[in-house]
Amino acid sequence: MRLTHVASLRLPFGPLLSYDLAVSPAEDTLPVSFDQARHVGGGDRTGSWMALAFSLPAPVPRDHLAAAWRAVVTAHGTLRTVFVRGDDGAPTLHEAGIGPGTWVRHEVAPGQAMQDALRAVLDAGCTPFARPSHRFCVIETADGPAIVVGADHAHVDMWSLLVIARDLLAALDRLREGLDPGLAGVPAFAEHSRCLLERPGAPAEVHRRWAEVIEAGGGAMPRFPLPLGDPAPQPERVEVRDVLDVTAMTAFATRAREAGVSTLAMTVSVLTATTREVAGADLRAVFPVHSRYEERWHDAVGWFITNSVLESADPDPGACAGAVREAIRLGSWPLAGIMAPWGGMPEAPGMLAVSWLDLRRLPVQVDSHALNAQYVSAAIRTTGVMLWFIIDGAGVHLRCRYPDTHEARRNVGTWLDDLVARMRDQAVNARPVSRS
């Protein structure tokens, strides 16, 4: 399944609707995770959302779509919570009552692209303090509805969007069979946040390593090692590149196994070699890791992601495997206490982040090919470089976002060219898989 951008999303033309749920005043106060506080603390803004788009193969009655969406919201606690700005300006999280919804038709202006009309709906409705901060959108066509589920990032991650799609499809199946669409309840994300708050703090050695990491970055998280131009927020440039097809991906994985490492570690090896060649520097990047550390969170919806740092100076695959293990270890502790000396995560313009998502290994699956499913990111202004690797049954593709300046186009583009060429070279030079 591809990760695309809202400006590149291909949508059919038809009536654009959203099913807007009624929200009653916020009630019980719930714990806020470290990353939620950081994200929501930035205030309402456009482009803070993420979405999943997919198509159904036949028309579906609106009342079935509405009932299925209500079943999803009922099952997942984070979709029934809202943020409120406290008296001190810090965000607080509250459980809200969700009532019946209404269908709202959104105008598509003459000459306006469907993705631009959709973007306007999600930018307006999926902001940190919106009530609720998610939207269930439908484009009706004779062949069947195109569905886009968008939510502010504070409540979802990419894994969560798969859970939402799977559960929505299950609820629709039940409705077609004449059954109640209700879904089994799962633990709410706020419970996960509470569990993290109750966990012991990180040991002194982990605090020391984090201090070393931040000191190595000049008092901030890692930055892209080449100039990106004006450090003020810039319009983004987004590139999506198909890196390896299925055959090449198999060969690349074979190369990794021969070296005794994972495909991720082999990719880090290539990233390290590229960064040393192109920038004359070690690889240092923010490295998101998931926090679904128990099976009970596998079917939950929330922002189950925390940040670590990946440091790799040696492209040897074994050394890179060690670097990945160290990154996972550093990201396995609650960050609030670790980041307290810096007043939170110390960011600076030019931050580099590298994300890895192997959809084949997730315990939640949907038929993305049959559904024409795509992850959709919002349009933003940016100062840093964010690289996503997405691996699925079709191969490996990457998506990179960076500031759209002349310097960034040249430097990030050269870095990506070298990275893709090296990954393909590893696949081409891998020994054939034995069929004996």
Image (cartoon, grey):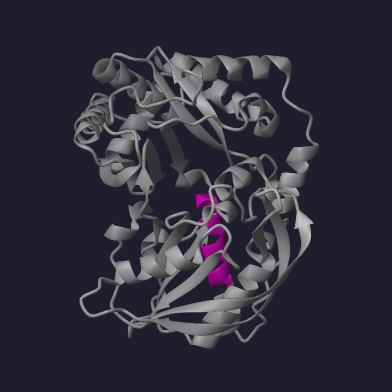
Q: Look at the image and tell me in which quarter the C terminus lies.
A: top left
Q: Who's the residue at 22% across and 33% down the image?
A: 413
Q: Does the magenta stretch include residue 184?
A: no
Q: Who's the residue at 69% across and 61% down the image?
A: 77
Q: Who's the residue at 69% across and 46% down the image?
A: 295
Q: Is residue 150 left or right of residue 335?
A: left
**Residue 320, placed above or below residue 383:** above
Residue 388: which quarter of the image? top left
**Residue 226, placed above or below residue 13:** above
Residue 173: which quarter of the image? bottom right
**Residue 247 or residue 370, whichever sits in front:** 370
**Residue 224, placed above or below residue 159:** above
**Residue 380 or residue 260, whichever sits in front:** 380
Residue 28: which quarter of the image? bottom right
Residue range in magenta is 157-170
Q: In this view, does 30 lie to the left or right of 101?
A: right
Q: Does any portion of residue 398 appear in the rendered image?
A: no
Spot occupied by residue 126 in the image (x, y as percentages of width and height)? 50, 63
Spot occupied by residue 370 in the image (x, y as percentages of width and height)? 38, 65
Q: Is residue 82 left or right of residue 263?
A: right
Q: Who's the residue at 73% across and 19% down the image?
A: 203
Question: Magenta part mainly helix, strand or loop?
Answer: helix
Spot occupied by residue 122 in the image (x, y as percentages of width and height)? 44, 66
Q: Is residue 165 magenta?
A: yes
**Residue 298 or residue 349, whichever sits in front:** 349
